[in-house]
Amino acid sequence: MDRRLGAPSGREELTARWQTQEGRALSKQSRRALANAAQAKQEVRERIWALLERERAVKAPGVEGRIPNFVGSEAAADQLALLPEWQAAGVLKANPDKAQLPVRARALDNGKLLYMAVPRLADELPFFLLDPKVLSAPPLEAASSRGAFTAARKAAVDELQPVDLVICGSVAVNRQGVRVGKGGGFSDVEVALLVEAGLLGPGTTIATTVHSLQVVDDPLPETEHDFSVDLIVTPDEVIPCGLPRRPPGIIWEHLDEEKIAAIPVLGAMAARRFGSA
């Protein structure tokens, strides 16, 4: 086809197929609801980022656009390690942000198998596999987002074992377990990948470590692709949340072609499921 005539690209044609197959196309009302939720989440982020900076509750280099590297992250990791959910867990999956580095290092120190997401899931093999039995670096170094590139090997989803405990970062979270991340949607995709693969089930606990200022009493916006947390752990307290909510897997109609293209594992899944572009 002549692209000068405005014909869709191959990627656009693939997008159209995954959004329309089996009635996946979103209505205008649904698209508007997603956009409104995204705007409301951004307002929450900006409010919490400003609060943390005003109260000097974060470490350098700051918070804008990030999971806050909050003051007291080590104490929150200590609190988490006292919980029966931690002690019973043999396999953990964690985000790569600095705020959760003390948790990841503690997991390796405690002999737990750790899967850490490759930053932004920007690899065909989207997880680092950190096995404490064969580490080539100290746990604190190996568990860092930079250190994992040399201390761990990357793994595909089908190489992973069922996960006992998921650790995620948050910008804000309420006592019902609804969380707001930094806005990239990567944690949601990570959880959805594990759900689709049968590696995250009813027995898996999801916990977030945060500063107490990140815990809000207000309702927070959420959508079908969001997950809730079971436990909130701050330096000072542990907050059990309500009934867990998990996505059913990848919700393709909530993804646009830019997101698919940015995450290689999603692009490969879409091509297999909906046909090559």
Image (spheres, rainbow, N blue to C red):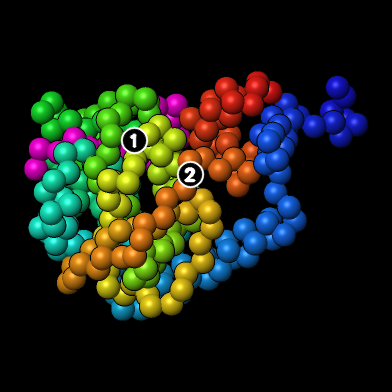
* Residue 117 inside the magenta-drawn segment: yes
Q: Is residue 28 above or below residue 1?
A: below
Tell me how many marks there are: 2
Vertical placement of residue 189 versus 122, above or below: below
Q: Is residue 197 visible?
A: yes
**Amino acid tagged 1:** Leu
Q: Quadrant of residue 138?
A: top left
User: Residue 135, image x and y in percent?
Assistant: 14, 30
Residue sitting nearer the eye, 150 or 45: 45
Label placed on residue 199:
1
Q: Earlier in the sequence, mark 1 or mark 2?
A: 1
User: Mark 2 Cα within 10 Å, few/some/many (few <14, many 20+)?
Assistant: some
Q: Residue 275 is drawn in which quadrant? A: top right
Residue 185 included in the magenta stretch of the image: no
At horizontal 68% and vertical 56% (from top left) the residue drawn is 30
Q: Range of the magenta residues?
A: 109-125
Q: Mark 2 belongs to which amino acid?
A: Pro
> Mark 2 sits on what residue?
248
Image side of residue 6 versus residue 81, left or right: right
Quadrant for the C terminus in the image? top right
Q: Residue at x 88, y 30 (%)?
A: 4
Q: Quadrant of residue 125?
A: top left
Residue drawn at point x = 51 percent, y = 50 percent: 225
On the image, the x and y values in percent for residue 56 come to 29, 75
SS assignment at label 1 = loop
Q: Is residue 173 left or right of residue 32?
A: left
Q: Is residue 218 left or right of residue 214?
A: right
Residue 50: give x, y in percent of width and height: 42, 74
Q: Is residue 56 above or below residue 84?
A: below
